[in-house]
Structure formats: C-alpha cells, structure tokens
Amino acid sequence: MAEYRVTPVGDGTLAGLRRHMAATGVSVSIVLSVATKPAQVASINDWAASINSPDVVAFGALHPDLPDPTEEVERIIDLGLRGVKFQPTFQRFAPDEERMFPVYRALEGRLAVMFHAGDEIQPAPEIPSTPRALAHVHKAFPGLTMIAAHFGGYRMWDEVREHLVGTGVCFDTSYCPPDDLPDQEMIDLIRAHGAERIIFGSDFPFGNPGPDLDRLLELGLEREEVEAIAWRNADRLLGLGLEAHRMAQ
C-alpha cells in the first residue's frame, strides 16, 4: 500500500474480504496474485488453490523468467484455477516481448489472462503494459482470453481508443475514479467497445466495490448492459456458474 500511497479499505485477509463482500452485496470475488520472482510461483499457486471456492475464485500466478511455464500452466489447470494475472510494472517485462510468447502459447485457449494495463496510481517512470503492447499480443494470439484492467489502460484511454476498442480484448472497470475517468467518458468507452466485453472490477482493497457498483448503476446504462458488466460476462468467460445459481433461486 505504501507503494501507491493509498489507504486500503480492507485488511487483506480472506475473512476480511468476505466481510466486505457481505457488506457491499458482492456474491463472488476474483482473487488475483502476482509473483515478482520465479521462486514465488509454485507457493502462490498452492495458496490460490487452497482458497479457491465458489465465492472466492482464485487466479494463479506466472513469471516471465519461469524456466518451464508450460509445466506450471498444466499444474495451474490441475489445481482448478481459472486464470493467471500479470503485473508487468512489478514483474519487469513488456507484454509483447517475444520471451512471453511461449507462455501465451501455453495459456491460449485454456486459461483467462488478466493484465494490469496502463499507468500506476502513483505515476510510473516507465509504463510497460500499454494498450499498444496489449494489442500486439492480441493480434499474435487471437485465441488468448485477455482482460485488460482499468478500462484497457489506466490514464491511457486515448491509446485504448486507438488500439484496443473494438477488439476481442475484454476490459475491467477497476480503479477508474471519476477524477481520472469521468462518467461520460466511461459510458462512451463502454458503448464503443461493447458492454459484452466489459467486466466489473474494484481493485479491492485499493478500491471499494460498494461505491463502484453504485456508480455503475447510476451511469444510465440499459439494464442488459449493467447485468452484462456486473456478472454475466465474468460468468461466461470464467465458467462461474452464476446463471445456474440465479435460476435455482
């Protein structure tokens, strides 16, 4: 938290997450972990598997310098995890570096891939995960299920419009406060890209899903658009079983 100079809204524990979910009306959370060293990957994935459950769905971790990414991808799948998270700023790589291509080949068509996209809360001296770089990855690996956080690129939305809007890359809505992305610009991005490719996210504990959900409801979108963003798209991409659960209620 010191890195971002942000006061967290949760305590970082699993129990604290579930308390916050109950208080804000969130039924399922996706937990995203990042390995900053190759040696951390196996233990992170073991931990992710240990917390994986119907209401807390854990993604696995990979690192660009992992000696055998294909073997770990197989293990992530065997562990029952539904995706992986990359944070190029802290993992020190650009998404479109060729050394990542074997990793993407191992993931393509098998697991969802979440990328941090754009700048950081505290502006970074270099931004490796640009919308342009993510577009290059999408073009090279069209079968890779890609989710670009922060509406495709935090504080880089002009480049998002130029390189990612209209592609098959999904965006999440996490940590895009109105001071950075005003409501009308958010609506315009949703409509330009298509609500069917937008996934609600909060970046908890940096962001708070309660106010973010309220904002989504108050944007003036159609009901079908809100439902798609709030849960249907994630349900479809990740196979969460939310549709069946709602029908059974």
Image: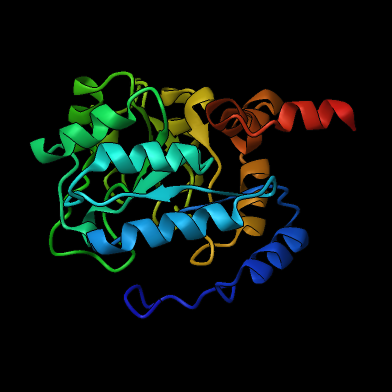
Q: Nearer the viewer, residue 14 or 159?
A: 14
Q: Please tell me which residue is depicted at 48% across the width and 23% down the height of the picture.
A: 194
Q: How many marks?
A: 0
Q: x and y percent of residue 189 in the render?
A: 42, 32
Left or right placement of residue 249 versus residue 232 in this view: right
One can see residue 161 in this view: no
Left or right placement of residue 121 versus residue 130 in this view: right
Color style of the picture: rainbow
Q: x and y percent of residue 17 in the render?
A: 64, 65
Q: x and y percent of residue 81 in the render?
A: 50, 42
Q: Farthest residue toward the right?
A: 249
Q: Please tell me which residue is depicted at 30% across the width and 39% down the height of the picture.
A: 71
Q: Nearer the viewer, residue 73 or 3?
A: 73
Vertical placement of residue 14 versus 151, above or below:
below
Give the position of the C terminus as an image quadrant.
top right
Q: Nearer the viewer, residue 95 or 81?
A: 81
One can see residue 9 in this view: yes
Left or right placement of residue 45 versus residue 210 in this view: left
Vertical placement of residue 168 versus 96, above or below:
above
Q: Please tell me which residue is depicted at 50% across the width and 32% down the height of the picture.
A: 198
Q: x and y percent of residue 88 in the render?
A: 23, 52
Vertical placement of residue 133 versus 128, above or below:
above
